[in-house]
Amino acid sequence: MVTIRNHNVILDAEFVNDLHPKILYELGKICPENQIRFQELYSKRKRSLGLAFICLIFFPGTHYAFLGRWQLQIMFWLTLGGAFVWWLVDLFRLPTLVKECNFYQQKKVLMAINSISIFKNAKPAQIPSMKEARVA
């Protein structure tokens, strides 16, 4: 268990080290069940740096598709990797791209879990009867 400003996170220390500090703070605010659900969902969506390098080296341009940036993949192919200059730059820029993609995935999973918990606790809306609607 990790304590962050009066909030407890019950996830593994190795898993917590990969999370963005803002996400980690927000995780501390939710219940332990949802923290475990976050870990399960994010583990499925997390992008691997090693696999991104394999995509970049052996299948140039597909690393953008792997990271969910289809427009950049098309531009990469149309310009032939910027005459291979773009490809060379991406060799050094890839760790940052993967980190940004993973942060985006963390935000998406956290928002999904928060919306599920909101709807789980919500009471069904009361629909007024026709008689009540006429009175109002």
Image (tube, helix red, strand yellow):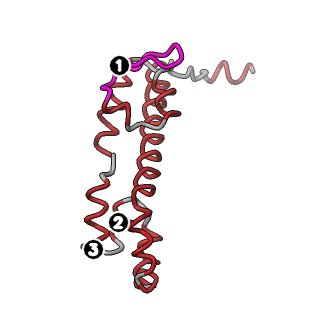
Tell me, for residue 10, which label it has, or none.
1
On the image, numbered disc 3 is attached to which residue? 59
67 over 36 or under it: above or below: below
Q: Are marks 2 and 3 in contact (CB under 8 Å)?
A: yes
N-terminal of the pair, mark 2 or mark 1, is 1
Q: Of the residues shown, which amino acid type is indicated by label 2?
A: His
Q: CA distance from mark 1 to mark 3?
A: 39 Å
12 over 45 or under it: above or below: above
On the image, numbered disc 2 is attached to which residue? 63
Residue 131 covered by magenta stretch: no
In the rendered image, the quadrant that contains the N terminus is top left
In the rendered image, the quadrant that contains the C terminus is top right
Q: CA distance from mark 2 to mark 3?
A: 8 Å
115 over 62 or under it: above or below: above
Name the residue at 44% across, 80% down.
Answer: 85
Provide the residue span drawn in magenta.
2-13
